[in-house]
Amino acid sequence: MDALVLVFVSGLVAMFIAMLKKPVLVLTAAGIGLTGSILLLYRQLMGHESLLKWSYEGLNFDQPAILFSILVLIFGLLVVIGGYQHFSRETEHTGEYISLLLFSMVGAMCMLSFTDLFMFFIGLEILSIPIYVMVGTNKNDIKSTEASIKYFFTGAFATGILLFGIALLFGATGTFKLDIMHDAIVRGAAQGPLLHVGILFVLASFLFKIGGAPFHFWGPDVYAGSPNIVTGFMATVVKTAGLFAFFKMFAFVFHGAYQFWSDILFAVIILTMLVGNLSALNQIKFKRLLAYSSIANAGYALLVLLTASPSSLDNLWIYLAGYGLAVIALITVSVILNDEEDNISSFKGIGRKNPWIGFALVIGLLSLAGVPPLFGFFGKYVVFFSAFQLYPILVIIAVINSGIGIYYYLKLLMLAMSEGDENSDIPTLKPTNLQILSLAICTIGLLTGGLIQLIP
């Protein structure tokens, strides 16, 4: 609870410090707040009591919630330091941008620790509303405005579906509390059309939020219209919070109705993987490519829901950690490149002319492709291996889709490492120290992340 409060206070401090028009002070406040929150959560993970004696029954920072909160905070810290150059271009608004991200992370932490559907809904809205604003911050780009409006309306539509689903679940179970709802479903006290339709509505709303097919249509346009660093935030922090909440609702609360929703999810996973990978093959814009890659990766992650076991949350954590670090590395490179047209062709030759940036780019792409011994390989391995015993055909389809993904990742890699022709003007990139730090952390994490398998 103290980490949640610290993130919120950091957002307030960043907002008020911005009046001094010194972006470095805003960055410092955000960095201290996020780093301090990570340390507080780690301290709690080690068995120490929370420094603040506050508690609220709607939030429970148990071990899984702490682990995923630490992951989300690390992603948020890397996004802030990697995107500082973008934020600081507008001195008057730097505090607003960073504080909005911090407030959104408060919502993400609520979604990771909720114990009733009231808190889940509040956390979801705290997470989403700042992002609606952040998506439209490129005021001179009509695509950014369009993306913000589209994200707002589709998000509001998904929220309406969720609320209707929650109302039906309350009618079926008579409660909003997750543990009581779980018991009612397992005992058979809650069953029939009211429960099943409620589950379907909640499933649809979750697929909206994580960008799963067939409710993925907002993703490519919103990712493409957003500032690069906001795209990275949505692809990591928002997706991590959404997938964890998805797991918590279906693998725990709705576990007693597994026979009802598992077949539906089976089909959704196949559709999500195919739509994401096949649509990514011919993309010429970097952020649209990243959007379809994100859709495909959501499909892989959903395999964990079908094979709920004691190790499932660990597998999901490993998968999302490898995926998030790779995405942040690629997004940071795109921020350094600063191509307003966002063409994939702008990456041509930058890896060869800028070897250190190229190395981080290569590691990020190979990790997303699932090449051993990088972190992304271990993430896919643990997810696919755990699902193979129950769903061998689904895992085979997932492996085939992963092979399709390797094609477009390697296509971008080869373009970045090509020599270019005589007429091409390959820029010499000049990253800031903070961007170098962000790339270094991501690269080291991707190279050594597999060692986490050795931790007992």
Image: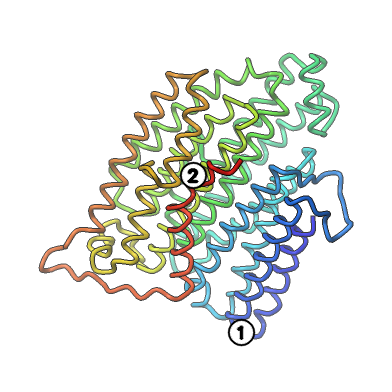
The dot on residue 218 is 2
The residue positioned 59% from the left and 75% from the top of the image is 93
Q: Nearer the viewer, residue 150 or 97?
A: 97
The residue positioned 42% from the left and 32% from the top of the image is 273
- Quarter of the image containing the N terminus? bottom right
What's the amino acid at mark 1? Lys
Outermost residue to the left: 422
Q: Residue 262's x, y, as percent?
A: 58, 20
Q: Nearer the viewer, residue 360 or 452?
A: 452
User: Which element carries disc 2, helix, strand or loop?
Assistant: helix
The residue positioned 71% from the left and 19% from the top of the image is 256
Outermost residue to the right: 53
User: Which element carries disc 1, helix, strand or loop?
Assistant: loop
Q: CA distance from mark 2 to mark 1?
A: 35 Å
Left or right of residue 431: residue 343: left
The residue positioned 74% from the left and 51% from the top of the image is 46
Of mark 2 and mark 1, the one earlier in the sequence is 1
Q: Nearer the viewer, residue 265 or 432?
A: 432
Which quadrant of the structure image shows residue 52? bottom right
Disc 2 crowd, CA 10 A, few/some/many (<14, 14-19, 20+): some
Q: Are marks 2 and 1 in contact (CB under 8 Å)?
A: no
Mark nearer the viewer, 2 or 1? 1
User: What residue is disc 1 on?
Assistant: 21
